[in-house]
Amino acid sequence: EAGVAQSPRYKIIEKRQSVAFWCNPISGHATLYWYQQILGQGPKLLIQFQNNGVVDDSQLPKDRFSAERLKGVDSTLKIQPAKLEDSAVYLCASSNRTGELFSYEQYFGPGTRLTVT
Amino acid sequence: SQQGEEDPQALSIQEGENATMNCSYKTSINNLQWYRQNSGRGLVHLILIRSNEREKHSGRLRVTLDTSKKSSSLLITASRAADTASYFCATVNTGFQKLVFGTGTRLLVSP
């Protein structure tokens, strides 16, 4: 089974520029997540999709970040304009709820390391 | 916001020794999960323990959960150099359908 794919793996941009990240989840996984992981910290959830609908975007800085999941499969996360503090690894994950109690086991992609200069 | 706090922040041991990492959290949980992250890579799910469970095993991993103390521990027995990574606990809070990660423990296993 193919894992979660992300691209690009690395990106360097200047502040105020825009950038987009792409994620392809595991086939059949209805739930997709974008996380931001700042160096030395744990991942922080930015947005969660269930199929192509947004479940939780409470921690997404909506003035500069946007995300979409067209057709309930691939997803893109965009930052426009970028700030220095956006330098981080952006992780995509997917999951498939199973069982009586949701397991919430998530499968992560390799991430995109963004450096804003 | 971070829910869990791992302790210690960093741990350095020799191959063959056991490694114990602790996680404390603040609110009621549905389940608690442990993930491993190798340098520059994504996270890998290790084990999940539900709030009504007290102990769980998977290979060389042993996880305990004490909901009265709001804490969990991850024990890696007979560690190997390949276990070198950061380990994160993550909780699924009661009523909230998402994972909240802790700050992580960096484990270094020397040959």
Image: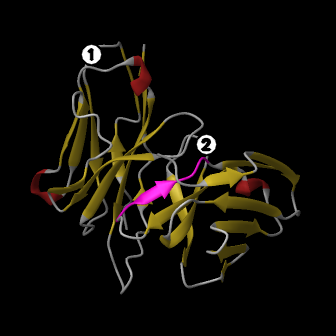
User: Which of the pair A49/B37 is nearer the observer?
Assistant: A49
Which quadrant of the view contains residue A52?
A: bottom left
Which quadrant of the view contains residue B69?
A: bottom right
**Label 2 sits on what residue type?**
Ser
Callout 2 secondary element: loop
Q: Residue furthest left?
A: A71
Callout 1 secondary element: loop
**Region in magenta:** B97-103
- Is residue B100 part of the magenta span, yes or no? yes
Residue A41 position in % (x across, y down): 56, 40
User: Mark 2 — residue?
Assistant: B39
User: Mark 1 — residue?
Assistant: A17
Q: Chain of mark 2?
A: B
Question: Could you tell me if residue B45 is visible in this image?
Answer: yes
- Disc 1 to disc 2, C-alpha distance: 28 Å
Residue B17 position in % (x across, y down): 88, 62
A46 with respect to B5 (left or right): left
Name above or below for residue B44 compared with residue A69: below
Q: Residue at x 39, y 26 (%)?
A: A86
